[in-house]
Structures are given as C-alpha cells and as structure tokens.
Image (cartoon, rainbow, N blue to C red):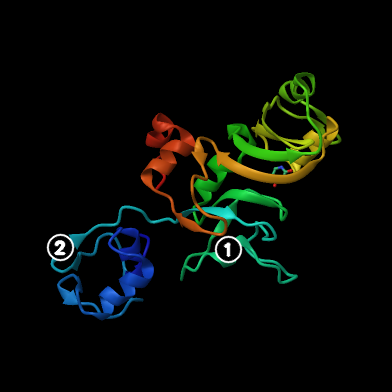
C-alpha cells in the first residue's frame, strides 16, 4: 500500500497546500489514529485515520498534475546538464518528482503539463491517442487559403507525411500573419517545420491548448494544480470520467 508523508497526505486531501499543511501539523491540529502528530514526515497510508480539528480527512488524489504557462528560454525537461532553467525548476514542491508531459521548444511559450503520474503522461503523449495541440504562430508573410489547405491535407517533411492539421489565419500583423494550427502529433519542431515547408517561417510560437484545455489567463511563468474541470477540458467529459485521473 502506498505510504505518504503526512504533509503530502494533507496536500493530496485538498486540506491545504504543502506549505500550509506543514504549519497545520506544527500547530498540533492533526491526529493520526487518535494520536497528535507533529512530524510532517510521519508515514501514513489511506488506512490510517487522519483528522484535522477533529474532522476526518481522506485522500482524494495521490498524484500531482500541474498546468503551466512556460516562458520562452526555459527547457521542457526535468533537468539540464548545461545548467539551463527547466520547467520543473519553476515549481516549488517538496518530495514530488515531476516530469513535463511532452515537449515544448526552448523558444516556444505556452501551455505545458507536469506530473508524477506515468499513466497520465502516456495518455496525453502516446501517438495512438492523437491528442490535439493548438498553437498560435506568428509567421512571416500572409498565407492564402491555398497555402493553408496544404497544412489541412498534411505536409511532406523529411521524417514523413504529417497528419492533416486544422489551420486558419486569425489575424494579420503588418506584413505578417498569426496562424492558428492544431496538430495531433508531437514530432520535433513540427509546427515550425510544417509552416517552413509551405513557405511561411515562424517568427514566434505559442501553444494555447492541449485537447480542450486552454491556457486561459495563467500568466507567463505561472502554474497551478489542475482542477477537476481541467481534466474534463483536456479529455472531454465522458473520457475524463472513465479515465479517473486527478
Ligand atoms: N512545434 C514546434 O515547432 N515547436 C514546439 O515547441 C511545439 C510544436
């Protein structure tokens, strides 16, 4: 049976953030199996009776799921041997080993998920699920409907034909345009290469959504724990119910 540190147990039960949980424990409000617990690293399982201020606390979630708005110039890795800042460094959580869910280029901003749940990682990134990813690309020039239809049919890249993408110009910016593009693969630098292939190099790239989960008003560099609603947006309501993540 999985054991948790008491602090983590409280955080996963939704009682408090990890930091606040530590304070609650230190203030003597937490009892485990009838005994006051002052040690945040005390090991507990779901079988233990944990109370805060006399109320029983149950774990609703044992894994961590985070949504982040990745800034430019940050690696979507767990660590870097050249000392560059990684997405994982932006999240200050004790005792959780997080991994980014898929990749986002160093020079791409936008939504990225982080987790310590391998099954969730697989469900989002495995090519067989064809999870949609939506980007806004500022491109040099103004693609026509004919140009966009090449993206919609699939583009021949050096590593083979891409799946058909959804693509539209959402606005013009001087001599350039912003193209909204949705792809269902995760090849290296795929959006840049697809737009290059049709003659419209990318000047700036931002990922705005994964599945139906948009970045919303999360500011650049900020992150938060995913809520129930986020899982529904990500997978769709029915599928989220079946999958039971989070
Ligand atoms: N496609 C790209 O070109 N870059 C990314 O970061 C993601 C998709």
Circle 1 residues within 10 Å: few <14, some 14–19, many ≥20: many
Circle 1 residue: 88
State left or right for residue 238 relative to residue 217.
left
Going 56% across and 44% down the picture, which residue do you hit? 122
Query: Which one is nearer the viewer's eye here, 166 or 1?
Result: 166
Residue ID at (51%, 41%): 214
Asked if 65 appears above or below 45 in the picture, the reply is above
Compare residues 65 and 139 and report the one nearer the observer.
Answer: 139
Quarter of the image for the N terminus: give it. Answer: bottom left
Q: Find residue 210 and report its horizontal and vertical position in percent.
A: 56, 40
The answer to which of marks 1 and 2 sits earlier in the sequence is 2
Q: Secondary structure at mark 2?
A: strand
To which residue does mark 2 refer? 55
Q: Is residue 30 above or below residue 69?
A: below
| Image quarter of residue 86 | bottom right
Residue 191 coordinates in the image, percent (x, y) = 73, 38
**In the displayed structure image, the side of residue 7 where residue 202 appears, left or right:** right
The image quadrant where one finds ligand 1 is top right
Q: Residue at x 20, y 64 (%)?
A: 49
- Left or right of residue 106, residue 246 in this image: left
Q: What is the spatial separation of the Cα atoms under label 1 and label 2, in whole angstroms?
A: 34 Å
- Pinpoint residue 114: horizontal percent, then vertical percent: 53, 54
- Residue 171 against residue 152 in the figure, above or below: below
The answer to which of 236 and 159 lies nearer the viewer is 236
Q: Secondary structure at mark 1?
A: helix
Tell us which disc is closer to us: 1 or 2: 1
Q: Residues within 10 Å of mark 2 (few under 14, many from 20)?
A: few
């Amino acid at each position: 049976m999985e054991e948790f540190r008491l602090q983590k147990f409280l955080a996963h039960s939704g009682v408090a953030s990890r930091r606040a949980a530590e304070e609650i424990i230190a203030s003597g409000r937490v009892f485990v199996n009838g005994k006051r617990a002052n040690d945040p690293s005390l090991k507990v399982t779901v079988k233990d009776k944990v109370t805060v201020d006399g109320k029983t606390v149950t774990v609703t979630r044992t894994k961590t799921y985070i949504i982040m708005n990745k800034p430019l110039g940050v690696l979507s890795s767990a660590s870097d041997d050249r000392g560059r800042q990684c997405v994982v460094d932006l999240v200050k959580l004790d005792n959780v080993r997080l991994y980014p869910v898929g990749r986002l280029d160093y020079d791409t901003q936008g939504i990225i998920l982080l987790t310590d749940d391998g099954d969730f990682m697989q469900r989002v990134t495995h090519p067989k699920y064809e999870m949609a990813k939506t980007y806004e690309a500022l491109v040099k020039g103004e693609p026509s409907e004919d140009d966009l239809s090449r993206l919609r049919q699939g583009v021949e890249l050096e590593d083979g034909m891409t799946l058909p993408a959804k693509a539209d110009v959402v606005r013009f910016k001087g001599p350039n345009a912003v193209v909204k593009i949705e792809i269902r693969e995760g090849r290296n630098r795929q959006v840049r290469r697809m737009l290059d292939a049709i003659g419209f190099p990318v000047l700036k790239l931002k990922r705005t959504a994964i599945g139906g989960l948009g970045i919303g008003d999360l500011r650049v560099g900020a992150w938060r724990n995913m809520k129930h609603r986020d899982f529904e947006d990500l997978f769709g309501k029915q599928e989220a119910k079946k999958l039971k993540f989070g």
